């Protein structure tokens, strides 16, 4: 009888490993991730206005992550530190419950005036937002303990530690802290970077990681988002 030809089985290459093995592909993958969820006219307008007033809004990838966190937690009460022109606020509101209220804090009245208009253009009733003007560290002590589902911090790194401490008090068990900018402009992984901002960020995220009160993960979206669930 004729013998069958032998078939040689070649090992299949993992597509993920192939991408990870290419430095240029990593940058392309990050760009793809940032553009995976597109922004509508309202968000694009808010982002353009942020640039006009000299602000750097959360990236689309980070915004999508915030919406996801709000939706996953069925968030009804959210605190945002850093209103800006409303980019992150719109993302958060779109993930929250239909009856949810966003409490957003900022020192700049003009920025909040723009954000108020953006929230209205996005279709949110005035009652869906509570806009408070003032220093976050002055306002936060007036907010109720354990009453919030999510606290988003988009502020100067110098205030990170105090904001994390406040979030621990404000959040209910199972509530989520989201801290923006934790990659410190790409310097977070460079041992030689010892500037005050980078050191502060390192100390903050280390404290959250080692705390018994948080279950954290660092999300490499946008400028880096540290997400942590309160135990």
Image (tube, rainbow, N blue to C red):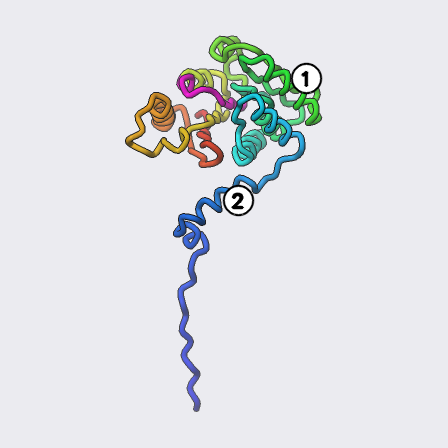
What segment carries the magenta color? 149-161
> In screen coordinates, is 7 left or right of 142?
left
Per the image, label 2 sits on a secondary structure element best described as helix
Q: Distance between the residues labelled 2 and 1?
A: 36 Å
> In screen coordinates, is 99 left or right of 158?
right
Decide whether residue 159 is among the magenta residues.
Answer: yes
Q: In which quarter of the image is residue 47?
A: top right
Residue found 49% across the figure and 34% down from its top: 222
The image shows residue 13 at horizontal and vertical percentages of 42, 60
Q: In which quarter of the image is residue 74?
A: top right
Residue topped by disc 2: 32
Q: Quadrant of the C terminus?
A: top left
Per the image, label 1 sits on a secondary structure element best described as helix
The image shows residue 57 at horizontal and vertical percentages of 54, 27
Q: Quadrant of residue 97?
A: top right
Residue 96 in view in this figure: no
Residue found 33% across the figure and 23% down from its top: 195
Residue closer to the observer: 89 or 149: 89
Q: Residues within 10 Å of mark 2 (few under 14, many from 20)?
A: few
Q: In this view, does 160 lie above or below 183?
A: above
Residue topped by disc 1: 127
Residue found 48% across the figure and 46% down from its top: 28
Residue at the limit of the structure toward the left, as seen here? 192
Residue 133 in view in this figure: yes
The image shows residue 110 at horizontal and vertical percentages of 60, 14
The image shows residue 206 at horizontal and vertical percentages of 34, 27
């Amino acid at each position: 009888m004729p013998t069958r030809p032998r078939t040689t089985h070649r090992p299949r290459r993992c597509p993920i490993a192939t991408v990870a093995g290419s430095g240029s592909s990593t940058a392309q993958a990050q760009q793809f991730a940032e553009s995976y969820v597109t922004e509508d006219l309202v968000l694009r307008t808010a982002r353009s206005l942020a640039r006009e007033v000299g602000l750097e809004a959360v990236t689309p990838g980070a915004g999508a992550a915030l919406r996801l966190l709000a939706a996953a937690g069925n968030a009804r009460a959210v605190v945002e530190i850093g209103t800006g022109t409303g980019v992150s606020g719109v993302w958060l509101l779109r993930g929250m419950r239909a009856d949810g209220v966003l409490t957003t804090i900022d020192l700049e009245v003009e920025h909040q005036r723009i954000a108020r208009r953006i929230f209205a253009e996005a279709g949110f009733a005035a009652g869906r937002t509570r806009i408070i003007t003032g220093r976050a560290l002055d306002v936060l002590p007036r907010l109720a303990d354990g009453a919030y589902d999510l606290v988003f911090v988009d502020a100067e790194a110098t205030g990170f530690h105090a904001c994390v401490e406040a979030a621990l008090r404000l959040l209910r068990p199972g509530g989520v802290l989201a801290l923006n900018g934790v990659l410190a402009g790409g310097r977070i992984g460079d041992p030689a970077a010892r500037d005050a901002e980078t050191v502060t960020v390192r100390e903050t995220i280390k404290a959250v990681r080692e705390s018994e009160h948080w279950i954290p993960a660092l999300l490499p979206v946008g400028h880096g988002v540290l997400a942590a669930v309160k135990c």
